[in-house]
Image (spheres, rainbow, N blue to C red):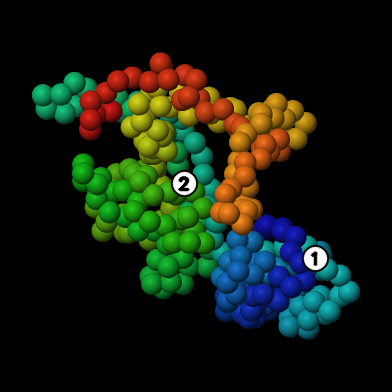
Amino acid sequence: MVESDTSESSKGSGQEQPRREKEGEDFRVMMIIYIEPRCQSVSKAAVGDTIVAIDGKVVNTWEDLDAAMRQPTTKASVTFRRRAFSICQCKGTTVETLTIKNDPKVMRAIQLYSVRLVVNNFDDDNDEESELLGLQVAYDAKERLQISRTNQDSLAAVHLHSSDIIREVDGHAVSSKTMLTYWIMEGIEKRGYACLSVEAAVDSDEDEGEDMPEDVVEIARRQLQVHRSLSSQSAPPMRPILRKSGNSSAEGQRSIQICDSTVEIPIASDFDAKSLKRVKKGQH
């Protein structure tokens, strides 16, 4: 069960429906069946979650929920029983070696981690479970299962990211979409969870920076330092600059005035031009 603080408006953002978890049970649960977009309950509650208590008081009937919402307060502590949640564990970083014909070996760092997708109250509705997971995969150049997209606010979007590679599901190696779906659904149906072994490239977010020449990257880095050093406490010395005024005389002549309120920020490439390398057109 997860406790989260939500405002009074967020308690009315979702619609709840009392439902028995199993036949023969005497108690009822308040299940969330809908959450309005862009409301305060987004990312705090999900469809299928059940409300257990509000401010420590157990909620079993509509009367209990209505009485809790009529309390004169702007905030309330709501205890949920999650229908689905995700747990991530990092296994460390290793090195992958890529061997290409007639080319030297290429080594890159990859991060290994496992993601456990837990789904409670499985009701054999495959379409509903697929929508809940929100996972879409495709084959990469090496015929591996690569995550192409995770639906917004879905269970897979919590820890899985695009371009990640799925290696195993519950210890079973997967190389096709059919087997991936089979092992995930079997784990959720029998045990209530499925554990994915995933690998991600460590330098995937630095591809754009690596394509730029080193001298350009160095100048850009120093220029960022100049901008970050500017603050109201330590302002750089102000330099006068010539600026034309917008007023014109009757004869159409423009006057020039000295403006002392303008600040010049030095550009690194202006005073450090020797560090730039000469390259041919079209080459970097």
Q: Is residue 97 visible?
A: no
Do tag 1 and tag 2 residues touch (Cβ < 8 Å)? Answer: no
Could you tell me the amino acid type at mark 2? Val
Q: Residue at 19% across / 27% down in the picture?
A: 99
Residue at x 38% of width, y 70% of height: 126
- Quarter of the rendering occupied by the N terminus: bottom right
- The answer to whether residue 50 is above or below residue 272 is below
* Image x and y of residue 174, in percent: 28, 48
Name the spot of residue 68 as percent of width and height, x first.
81, 75
Q: Crowdedness of circle 1 by 10 Å Cα count: few (<14), some, many (20+)? A: some
Above or below 54: residue 23: below
Q: Residues within 10 Å of mark 2 (few under 14, many from 20)?
A: many
Q: Nearer the viewer, residue 19 or 240?
A: 240
Residue 136 picture quarter? bottom left
Relative horizontal placement of residue 218, taking residue 266 as reference (left or right) = left
Left or right, 110 with respect to 70, comes to left
Q: Which residue is mark 1?
A: 76
- CA gap, disc 1 and disc 2: 31 Å
Q: Residue at the spot x=71%, y=70% of the render?
A: 10
Which secondary structure lies at badge 1?
Answer: strand
282 and 134: which is toward the camera: 282
Please name the amino acid that badge 1 sits on. Ala
The quarter of the picture where the C terminus appears is top left
Q: Would you place residue 193 above or below residue 50 in this image?
A: above
Outermost bottom residue: 63
Q: Which circle's residue, 1 or 2, is located before the other in the chain?
A: 1
- Can residue 242 be seen here? yes
Look at mark 2 in the image and give the residue it sits on. 115
